[in-house]
Amino acid sequence: MIKISRFAKTLASMMPNLAQSFAEGQLNKKFDHALYSLKPKHRIFQQSIVINDDLPNRIACGAIKIKSNVTQFTENGVQFDDGTFEDDIDVVILATGYVFGFPFMEKGLIDVRQNKVRDFN
């Protein structure tokens, strides 16, 4: 479990590279993102963090397969840039991002600016 206090937040703002390296190291102890080709191009605090406890287990048991980049779609299949091909594909889901917000709450209650929420005022 990672706890974030005002002190930790202040320290991270003074030494961002050290804080990011520490946080990435702690998370990679639980799940090696590079091993499963899920290491992002950005650093940990440069985007909103999404945690999914179910994903590592599903990858490990083979229920989810990590594939490389798509180079071509055929009528019923997909060609990947590593040369592999998957045939008899029913659905392709393009999950490229999301908009962060709380549409179910009264406006102004939680201030969302540029897809971010200030956690300490």
Image (cartoon, rainbow, N blue to C red):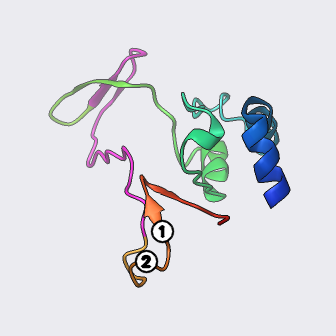
Residue 107 percent across, percent down from the top left = 38, 79
Helix, strand, or loop for circle 2? loop
Number of numbered discs present? Answer: 2
Q: Farthest residue toward the left?
A: 75
Query: In front here: 18 or 15?
Result: 15
Residue at 82% in and 44% down = 11
Quarter residue 59 falls in: top right
- Can I make out residue 3 in this image? no
Residue 72 percent across, percent down from the top left = 24, 23
By secondary structure, the bulk of the magenta-drawn segment is best described as loop
Q: Farthest residue toward the bottom?
A: 106
Asked if the residue under mark 1 is in contact with the one under mark 2, i.e. CB atoms within 8 Å, the reply is yes
Q: Is residue 97 magenta?
A: yes
Numbered badge on residue 108: 2
- Can I make out residue 16 in this image? yes
The region drawn magenta spans 78-101
Residue 92 placement, left or right of 11? left
Residue at 59% in and 44% down = 62
Q: Is residue 62 magenta?
A: no
* Callout 1 amino acid: Asp
Residue at 26% in and 48% down = 90
Numbered badge on residue 111: 1
Quarter residue 84 falls in: top left
Residue 74 percent across, percent down from the top left = 18, 29
In the picture, the quarter occupied by the C terminus is bottom right
Residue 99 placement, left or right of 59? left
Category of crowding for the residue at label 2, using alpha-carbon neighbours closer than 10 angstroms: few (below 14), some (14–19), many (at least 20): few
* Callout 2 amino acid: Gly
Query: In front here: 21 or 35?
Result: 21
